[in-house]
Image (cartoon, rainbow, N blue to C red):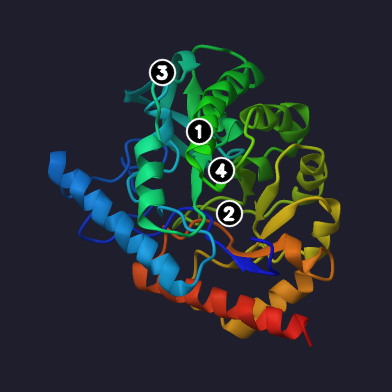
Amino acid sequence: MTKPFLATGVGSMPKPAWLMEQLPLNAKGKQVHGKGADWHFSGDLLEQAMDDATRVTIHDQEHAGLDVISDGEQRRTSYLTYITNRLDGFDYETLAQKWTRNKRRLAEVGRCIGPVRRSTPMLTRDAEFLLAETDRPVKMTLPGPMTVVDSTADEHYGDEATMAMEVADALNAEARELDALGVAVIQFDEPVFSRYPDKVRDWGITALDRCLEGITRAKTAAHICYSYPMPGVPRPIVDSYPVILEALENSKIDQLALEFEASKLDPELLRLCPSKTVMFGCIDNGPHDIETPEHVAAKLLAAARHLPAEQIQAAPDCGLVPLPLAIARAKLKSMVEGARLAREQLGK
């Protein structure tokens, strides 16, 4: 876990076509923050299909050579609603419309209609299954509190920061259980950090740190990108990393998953977070073109001019769920080969 340019995924992997209908992430009536796409199975057969899809994605990641394995979020119609649907206080039967991601798009979202609480475990079975199916270190992902607030319609609290702290308490209870199970990395997905740098400084870091209380074994991570690419939806790259990386340097988080490939951001930004391990985004989850190993190696070595190589991990910009499965597999293999090339060149 300390070698230079260790290879990891961010979280999601594409689902097989036999498991779920294949729709764009912003398909009308199937928004990523709403009800999601439909499964092709139901009942016990769906559970068996999810288990098999998870085994497939574990094999794909191991075959590619990743050092840290996730479940590819194969059981989730959405990285976010899989969790919020299981928390008390949210209603997904009657959705609301809300501008999200600093007015990037108008989305169909669940409503917060009461106090947010975690009354039952949410990922225990998923984590136990993953740990039983691989001998490599595993990662589990949770949506971060600021992203939950932005991705739902608040009809209860009337104050974003207050709601975020209650969400953080609920997520912390889940994270502590994952820690006790032996999960190696617990990642909180906070794509909205890039859209609201002022909120990050005001209360976002405080809410994130609350998620980490009592975690003693696992490494903790925060994933920050500019959100999934979606057909017909603008994806502006705003100049927010300088603000949020400086703020995150003062947080308790161990690792940062950052986007550097699609955004074309300068790796010199890594100098703003010298104490953190960085999952350095060097694979784009939008285009179907496969980045070459040489391209990946050059990106990683450029990053290593600003942060020790042992603190840099090769990673995609974001989850690979928007891609066809064959393309995602090829990109991971190229990324791992690029990390190997970078290690070789580093040692010369």
Image vertical order of residue 283 relative to residue 152, above or below: below
In front of the other: 174 or 191: 174
77 relative position to 311: left or right: left
Looking at the rendered image, the disc whose residue lies closer to the viewer, 4 or 2, is: 4
In front of the other: 271 or 311: 311
Q: Residue at x 69, y 79 (%)?
A: 342
175 relative position to 27: left or right: right
Disc 4 marks a residue whose amino acid type is Ile
Q: CA distance from mark 4 to mark 1?
A: 21 Å
Q: Quarter-wise, where is residue 15 in the image? A: bottom left
Looking at the rendered image, the disc whose residue lies closer to the viewer, 2 or 3, is: 3
Which residue bears the numbered disc 3?
Answer: 119
Tell me which label, 2 or 1, sits earlier in the chain: 1
- Proximity of marks 4 and 2: CB atoms separated by less than 8 Å: no
Which residue bears the numbered disc 2?
Answer: 235
Looking at the rendered image, the disc whose residue lies closer to the viewer, 2 or 1, is: 1
Which residue bears the numbered disc 4?
Answer: 186
Label 1, secondary structure: give it. loop
Whether residue 310 can be seen here: yes
